[in-house]
Image (tube, rainbow, N blue to C red):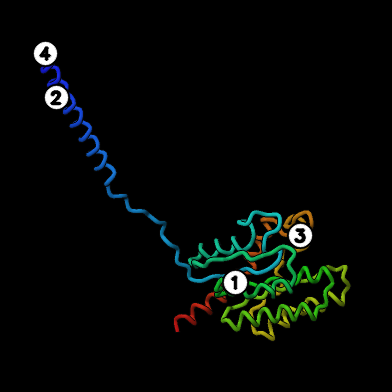
Amino acid sequence: MNIILCRRTTWEERVICLCLTMLFFLAGCENKREPLPETTPEQIVFQGTIIAVGDSLTAGYGLAEDEAYPALLENRLRSDGYNYRIINAGISGETSSGTFARMKWILAQRPDIVILETGANDGMRGIQTDLIKENISRSVQILKEHNVSVILAGMRMLTNLGPGYRSAFAEIYPEVAREQDVLLIPFFLEGVAGVPSLNLADTIHPTAEGYKIITESIYPSVLQVIGEIENNRTR
């Protein structure tokens, strides 16, 4: 009897061991399955890069980023078949001196076009117009030296600064555009400035509807420069 019991126990142990061995084998096979190939989203290839450089008027003060003109302009271009990336490089409160100081960073983004809107904060602080002009002119010159096409956005100043200052300020932009031979948008806020329904409560910064008008206003200038760039590429 004792011998029979020992044999039965040994047979059961062998069966259990065999089952465990099969389980470990199957688990090993499961772990050795080849991983599924990773999928990555298709990389977008842009025709070029446009940087919108400026102050709070470019940044879209008080609004969502997709309501400011750079985002609207990018959507407008894409709807017409121009696959250009637009970087919103607007900084609220920035003066023309700050813009000039950022030229190295701007160039590091390798832009094809820069839309330059600056000087309004200088004007509201009564900074000498000669200094404002020098900052803007030097910024444009640096961009041109690196083969960046520049669209200069003109600004006008508030009436409470007096007619002499307002006139000298307004002349900055056509003078720089003429001397540096760049395209000028005569007045960035054309059709929006002074219209209460198109500006925030501060009467300075455009609403979302105001930016739609600005986008349509500057659009022909952007298309003109893009056309010049594309023609040069095909030569």
Residue 235: x and y in percent read: 45, 84
**x 59%, y 72%: residue:** 222
Residue 60: x and y in percent read: 68, 59
Is 103 located above or below residue 75 in the figure? below
Q: CA distance from mark 4 to mark 1?
A: 105 Å
Earlier in the chain: of badge 3 and badge 1, it is 3
User: Horizontal placement of 9 versus 201: left or right?
Assistant: left
**x 54%, y 70%: residue:** 49
Q: Secondary structure at mark 3?
A: loop
Q: Amino acid at mark 1?
A: Pro
User: Horizontal placement of 48 versus 3: left or right?
Assistant: right
Q: Nearer the viewer, mark 4 or mark 1?
A: 4
Earlier in the chain: of badge 3 and badge 4, it is 4
Residue 152 appears in which quarter of the rendering? bottom right
Residue linked to disc 1: 220
Residue linked to disc 3: 195
Mark 4 is surrounded, within 10 Å at the Cα level, by few (under 14), some (14 to 19) or many (20 or more) other residues, namely few
Residue 188: x and y in percent read: 70, 69
**x 14%, y 17%: residue:** 5
Earlier in the chain: of badge 4 and badge 1, it is 4
Q: CA distance from mark 3 to mark 4?
A: 109 Å
| Of residues 126 and 30, the one drawn nearer to the viewer in this rendering | 30
**x 47%, y 80%: residue:** 233
Q: Amino acid at mark 4?
A: Met
Q: Amino acid at mark 3?
A: Val
Label total for image: 4
Q: Which mark is residue 11?
A: 2
